[in-house]
Amino acid sequence: MRYSIISIFLFLLLLSSIPVLPEGSSIASGISFDHQVEDILIRTTYWSPYGSEKWRITDNKILYIKLEILDMPEGATILVEHMHADCFIHSYFEDIDGLLQDTMDDKIHGGSTPGFLVSTSYPYTEIFSIEGYSKWLIEGWMFVVGGYGSGRIREKRLTEENLIEAGVLGSEFVIVYDILIKYQGEQYYHKAMIIDNFYVFLDGGFVPPEGEEEKEVIAVYPYRVEGFIVGITGIAVLIIGIILAYISSRVPDFDYEGIAIALILGGLGLLLIAAALYWAYDLLVIES
């Protein structure tokens, strides 16, 4: 029951957010969302001087953030108590999708004022500086390629090209505001929340490039040759073990030592073949 109530609340919260996109827009021209919060109409806007034609994950970038009041009751006081912004990796590959690239928080530190005043005359503005090779992205990438995650992407350096090869489509932004509201005649503030969620793709736009939705990423594996060699070696060792077992069983005095060695070689051969088959599962790459 509790989860049903939470789901309904989040749905209504997202429903109150209306995106306003200019025709042919990109992150360079910006994206806006209109929010109806009680009797207050709020518009949030995001844009970046970077990204008119491309959006490289590993480049340092800035995102301008603006919250403005379009309409409010007379005598109301509105404060932005806290703003939290996250930049995630957006990818078809589930192990990479959602990796945190950068994050920031903004609030007043100390003083008697609980937040930043906003009104029809005074908007709230901030700059989100996004680090290309951030510690969060490096740690997340190493978690995936180092075998702690799925292990299906192994020992590939963190580069723009390798990110694209692993199905990365762009960045996902999630921005959350804590808004304090006090109407005329009230003594205390009460809190409301605003959340914005949007994607910036590698061409700088807000929608996937044509044909991108047909791609599927299962895994990327760089050691195709090594896997093949391991498989062939396993087959050869297994055959040697079988031959040795046959020879040992044909001698006049049954050769138990030869049989034992043959069983060890056969087991080793099967183990190598199993390892090669496991790696072969990872030979699948991006297919369109």
Image (tube, rainbow, N blue to C red):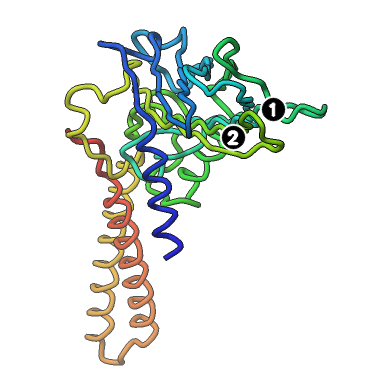
Q: Label 1 near label 2: C-beta < 8 Å?
A: yes
Residue 248 image offset from top left, x and y in percent: 28, 82
Task: Tell me the distance, in whole angstroms, between the alpha carbons under discs 2 and 1.
Answer: 9 Å
User: Mark 1 — residue?
Assistant: 115
**Is 152 drawn above or below residue 174 in the view shown?**
below
Q: Is residue 7 visible?
A: yes
Compared to residue 186, the image places residue 148 above or below, namely: below
Left or right of 194 in this view: 241: left
Instruction: Determine the residue positioned at 40% across, 13% down.
Output: 30
Q: Look at label 2 and name its amino acid.
A: Asp
Quarter of the C terminus within the rendering:
top left
Residue 22: assigned label: none
| Residue at image location 52% in from the left, 40% down from the top | 140
Residue depicted at 33% across the width and 28% down the height: 169
Q: Amino acid at mark 1?
A: Gly
**Label 2: which residue?**
178
* Horizontal side, residue 6 vs residue 79: left or right: left
The reply to whether residue 157 is visible in this rendering is no
Vertical order, 168 against 256 (above or below): above
Q: Quadrant of the N terminus?
A: bottom left
Please give the name of the residue rendered at 32% of the width and 22% of the height, measured from the top-left corner.
206
Asked which secondary structure carries label 2, the reply is strand
What SS does tag 1 mark? loop
Measured as percent of width and height from the top left, residue 204 is found at 35, 16
Of 242 and 253, nearer the camera is 242
Neighbor class of circle 1 (other Cα within 10 Å; few <14, some 14-19, many 20+) is some
Given the current orientation, which residue lies at the most extreme bottom position?
253
In percent of width and height, residue 142 lies at 52, 40
Q: Residue furthest right?
A: 111
Left or right: where does residue 210 sit relative to residue 65?
A: left
Q: Is residue 9 above or below residue 105?
A: below
**170 or 266: nearer the eye?**
170
